[in-house]
Amino acid sequence: MNIKSLLAAASLSLFCASSHAGVIYEWQPTNEETPRGITLQLEFDEATVNSGAFSFNLADYLGAHKRPRQGLLSLTYSFDAENGDGLMSYSSRTGFDSGYGPDALLELDLRFGSDGLLSGYIYANDTEHHVGLDSSGSLFTVFTANSDAGMGGAGCGWTTDVECGGASGYLRQTGITPTVPAGEVPEPASLALLGLGVLAAAATRRRKQR
């Protein structure tokens, strides 16, 4: 294999590796309505974002349903991040981190704007906490939020009879990150690229020796 072929193969490997990057969207509030101080982050694979739209409906009772590895990679929500309360976490690898039950549910119907904003519908329930958001254009409003432990830290009181709602904000693209967690084995494309780099260096050395 000559140098040009090696470089072409390396470029292809780089393209394959980049297709596994995660695109992150984060909540940016626009008012002070309840629930106050919430955080929400969603991560999607690039192919899903580039497709322009994504629909997802998963009842995850005791992890019985197979979770798709593409599309939504992770979702993290908290209504009192300052005190470390009300954390809900979902990943395509492990599902919800706690609170499995017959009402565990994740529903998304989203569109990805060219301006880096999401629009559509989000509902997440891990049976301990739930939150629902709907958008008008790109502006989302929380239409329901609750927790078994109450949501006093978000200004919503301490009883489960009190439903929070009214907070508005945008879900804006804030970054792109590799999806392979630290410590895991690199994907085949990354290993192939490393091998091609070694081969290219060896080929260059042989040419200099001639």
Image (cartoon, rainbow, N blue to C red):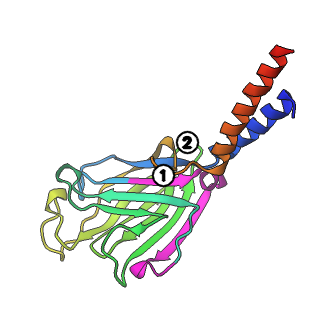
Horizontal side of 152 relative to 70 (left or right) equals left
Q: Position of residue 127 (x, y in %)?
A: 31, 76
- Above/below status of 127 relative to 193: below
Query: Dividing the image into 4 quarters, which one contains the C terminus?
Result: top right
Inspect the image, locate mark 1, and give the three-letter code of the amino acid beneath it. Answer: Ser
Horizontal side of 37 relative to 137 (left or right) equals left
Q: 79 and 197: which one is in front?
A: 197
Q: 37 and 59: which one is in front?
A: 59
Q: Position of residue 164 (x, y in %)?
A: 24, 66
Query: In the structure shown, which secondary structural element does the residue marked by tag 2 occupy?
Result: loop
User: Badges 2 and 1: C-beta atoms under 8 Å apart?
Assistant: yes
Inspect the image, locate mark 2, and give the three-letter code of the amino acid beneath it. Answer: Asp
| Magenta-tinted stretch | 41-65
Query: Dividing the image into 4 quarters, which one contains the N terminus?
Result: top right
> Quick one: label 2, few (<14), some, or many (20+) residues within 10 Å?
few
Q: Position of residue 123 (x, y in %)?
A: 41, 68
- Looking at the image, can residue 172 be seen? yes
Q: Position of residue 133 (x, y in %)?
A: 39, 63
Q: Quadrant of residue 70?
A: bottom right
Who comes first in sequence, dot 2 or dot 1?
2
